Amino acid sequence: MGATLPVGTAAGPASAATAPDTCVSSPGPAQGDAREVLTIAQQAQREFGLNSVILRVSSDGREVLTTALGESMTGVPAEPSMHFRTGSVAIVYMGTVLLQLVEQGKASLDDPVSRWLPEVPRGSEITLRMLGDSTSGFHDYVTDPAFLAELEAAPFRNWTPAEVTGIATGKPLLYKPGTNWSYSHANFAILGAALEKISGVSLDKLLTERVMKPLGLSQTSNQYTPQIPEPVLHAFTSERGTYEESTFWNPSWTTAPGAVLVQNICDLDRSARAVGTGELVSEKSFRTQLDPGTIGLGHATASCPASVCLLTNTAAHHFGLGLIVVNGWILTNPSFSGYAAIQAYLPAKKLAISVSVTQGPKSPEGNSAETIAERISSALAPGQELKMR
């Protein structure tokens, strides 16, 4: 694996079951900014031993470069049209839908969760806002050793919302709700259920009607099973000790049913621009989405140690309502068992960077898509670089 395709190289016909391919590599040869972005991606693919790097960069809505490097599987070149998992992008969409429902008077950010989901433990103390901005105090079940052991032993297992949220809600809160910040997947699993109760619409239809259709995200879909629509970007990982394919490991534990998303790179670019400009919400709601009150929160305490709480929740680097703000960039950075991606938008320059990568047998741990995006930002937005750490 790891062969690099030049920009514009055809990678074979699309599946007969798919629509005509409109997400394709930019015609070569690359020049100017496009050439610089391509060089950064090629160097990173070699440096990190990545099977594939797929990216799209746009400026003021105009394409700078779309390309796919490397392979999906041995002998199968990566293509921009290939679908990959983008879990935390759905979290941004859920935050957006929550704000839309609040704008319509169907709920308030300060409604207690118990108004909509009376069965949630401590729901009278935790608000919808606290779920969205991750200040509820719930443990993150993804860090629970028993859960991780079961996940590693059976990666194809289907997890129910009650099973995963029960791990989090079965433990004492890390802190008084609203007083600190700590990321928890449980927040968004519960928020998805609350959105269904508020709207009376299933979450997958809610996201489709309020986000995907308005933005024209035709290659974005929820999956209730581990299936990924063709064409598929295959993933591999060494996280269980042996390098193996992980494409169809079950993602049911990652977030609320109805929000387990797959996308291609062109939809990720469109998403980055829409989220980064607040296209789907009012100006007031967009300000809330960027900072619902999380700046200054995230300090370690006896009940919320540094390994759990973010220590850099400052005006320059903080968590908003389902999204991340870093040095003026508005982003999210999904990662799942061999897949890693980022969508990032810089309003000051109307610059969008979207990257998806898959790991090779010697790839480092962590999200290499972030690093590639950081390097591209340094080249195209000097002085306002994206720095995740």
Image (tube, grey):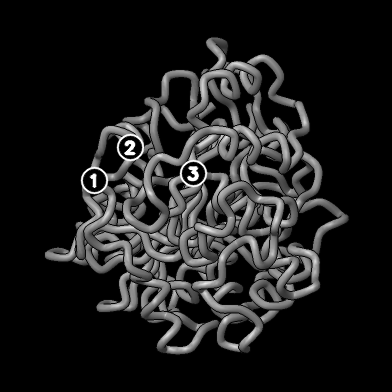
Whether residue 268 is visible to the viewer of this picture, yes or no, is: yes
**Is disc 2 in contact with disc 1, using a CB cutoff of under 8 Å?**
yes
**Is disc 2 in contact with disc 3, using a CB cutoff of under 8 Å?**
no
Residue picked out by circle 2: 304
Residue picked out by circle 3: 138
Q: Secondary structure at mark 3?
A: loop
- Give the residue type at disc 2: Cys
Precedes in sequence: disc 2 or disc 1: 1
Q: Secondary structure at mark 2?
A: loop
- Give the residue type at disc 1: His
Extreme-right residue of the structure:
17
Precedes in sequence: disc 2 or disc 3: 3
Precedes in sequence: disc 3 or disc 1: 3
**How far is the residue under mark 2 from the one under mark 1?**
8 Å
Residue picked out by circle 1: 299
Image: 170 above or below 28:
above
**How far is the residue under mark 2 from the one under mark 3?**
10 Å
Q: Quadrant of the C terminus?
A: top left
Q: Nearer the viewer, residue 274 or 210?
A: 210
Extreme-left residue of the structure:
383
User: Which image quadrant is residue 245 in?
Assistant: top right
Location of residue 265 in the rendering, given as x and y in whole percent from the top left corner? 55, 58
